[in-house]
Image (spheres, coloured by chain):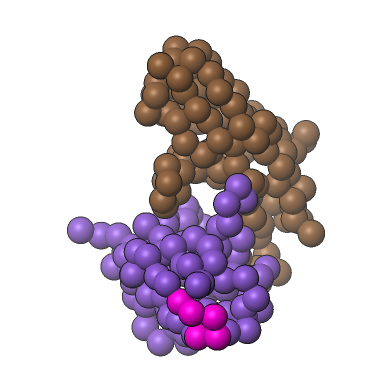
Amino acid sequence: DGGITQSPKYLFRKEGQNVTLSCEQNLNHDAMYWYRQDPGQGLRLIYYSQIVNDFQKGDIAEGYSVSREKKESFPLTVTSAQKNPTAFYLCASRRTGFGTQYFGPGTRLTVL
Amino acid sequence: EDKVVQSPLSLVVHEGDTVTLNCSYEVTNFRSLLWYKQEKKAPTFLFMLTSSGIEKKSGRLSSILDKKELFSILNITATQTGDSAVYLCAVERSGGGADGLTFGKGTHLIIQP
């Protein structure tokens, strides 16, 4: 089946630790995105990548890092520099140029 | 700075009622407006609107965009309990190398039996 997968579904982290969230898609989409959602809030863009080996900061990139070594994969690292990392993280993808963004199931990160 | 404002933020109605959700926006180089439905996890796509005045329809849901007044509405007729969700509005800009969607905070819709 074609789609976007994110893992893990739930993640717990101690303060001061880096953690990496996985996002994989088999839709042959060029563009991939990471969003963060806090309770009662809309989604906010963290990073996006329109092509392999290239990515751009979104509105709230501080404390996060990404890589795009393969078309199918766009992992997000939440670093210890992120002041308030507890949130729901959503990955999305779409074909370049124009089109709808489709979302993965999300990872809920809790910092203890 | 791009801005998307949804109203109301929450709404409780009875099954069978009709609801109208609002979305106003300010965005540089508007390209499209999208509606998503979110039920506790990933948002699922409902509509993409690019042209003013053309209604998009899918079953009991419909949406229309007014590019002059910079707003969109999402209508749900004959509501059912399964329509309970957060409805998100997002806008996409074009050009300038920018990408990604700007979202509103969402409307939390509760349908009571």
Say if B27 sits above or below A17 in the image: above
Quarter of the N terminus of chain B within the rendering? bottom right
Quadrant of the image occupied by residue A79: bottom right
| Left-right relation of A74 to A45 | left
Residue A48 x/y as whole percent: 54, 72
| Left-right relation of B104 to B108 | right
- Kindly identify the residue that appears in the image at 29 percent across and 68 percent down: A26
- Residue B13 seen in this snapshot: yes
Range of the magenta residues? A13-17
| Left-right relation of B33 to A6 | right
Residue B57 x/y as whole percent: 46, 27
Say if A56 sits above or below A7 in the image: below
Quarter of the C terminus of chain B within the rendering? top left
- Kindly identify the residue that appears in the image at 65 percent across and 47 percent down: B104
Say if B36 sits above or below A51 in the image: above
Which of the pair B73/A63 is nearer the observer? Answer: A63
Residue found at the very far top of the displayed protein? B16
Quadrant of the image occupied by residue B60: top left
Residue A71 x/y as whole percent: 37, 78
Number of on-image labels? 0
- Kindly identify the residue that appears in the image at 78 percent across and 34 percent down: B69
Residue found at the very far left of the displayed protein? A1
The brown-tinted chain is B
Q: Main secondary structure of the magenta part?
A: loop
Residue B9 x/y as whole percent: 65, 35
- Residue A23 seen in this snapshot: no
A58 drawn magenta? no
A15 drawn magenta? yes
The purple-tinted chain is A
